[in-house]
Image (cartoon, grey):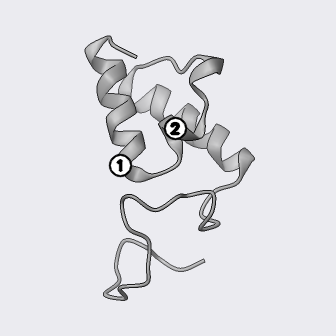
Amino acid sequence: MGNYLFTTDDSELRDADSLMLRGVIDSTGALEMILFLEESYEITVAEEEMVLENLDSVDKIVAFVGRKRDGAT
């Protein structure tokens, strides 16, 4: 896997790209990411919130964490 942070390649990962479809994370990686989000942002991700609509792109993750921190899910 390449380094998505430091690249000028336009075909690389964008904030709205699906992390699953692009092969960036799999189901195990998603669980690791959820643990990271919970610890880093002091939130709790309920089982019913562990869906692609909340966690499948950088944009979706940012919006989800923002909603959780604001108290609205």
Q: Residues within 10 Å of mark 1 (few under 14, many from 20)?
A: some
Dot 2, how many residues are within 10 Å of its Cα: few (below 14), some (14-19), or many (20+)?
few
Location of residue 16 with respect to 36 vertically, above or below: below
Q: Residue at x 61, y 29 (%)?
A: 50
Q: Is residue 59 above or below residue 35?
A: below
The percent position of residue 32, horizontal first and vertical second, equals 63, 41
Mark 1 lies on residue: 59
Q: Please give the name of the residue rendered at 57% of the width and 32% of the height, measured from the top-left corner.
A: 35
The type of residue carrying mark 2 is Glu
Q: Nearer the viewer, residue 39 or 23?
A: 23
Residue type at numbered disc 1: Asp
> Gap between marks 1 and 2, in whole Å?
10 Å
Q: Residue at x 60, y 77 (%)?
A: 1
Q: Is residue 61 above or below residue 41?
A: below
The kind of secondary structure element at disc 2 is helix
Name, please, the residue furthest toward the top.
71
What residue do we see at 66% from left, 49% from top? 29
What residue would you read off at disc 2?
53
Viewer-nearest residue: 6 or 10: 10
Q: Mark 1 and mark 2 in contact? Answer it, CB < 8 Å.
A: no
Relative image position of residue 48 (x, y in whole percent): 63, 19
Q: Earlier in the sequence, mark 1 or mark 2?
A: 2
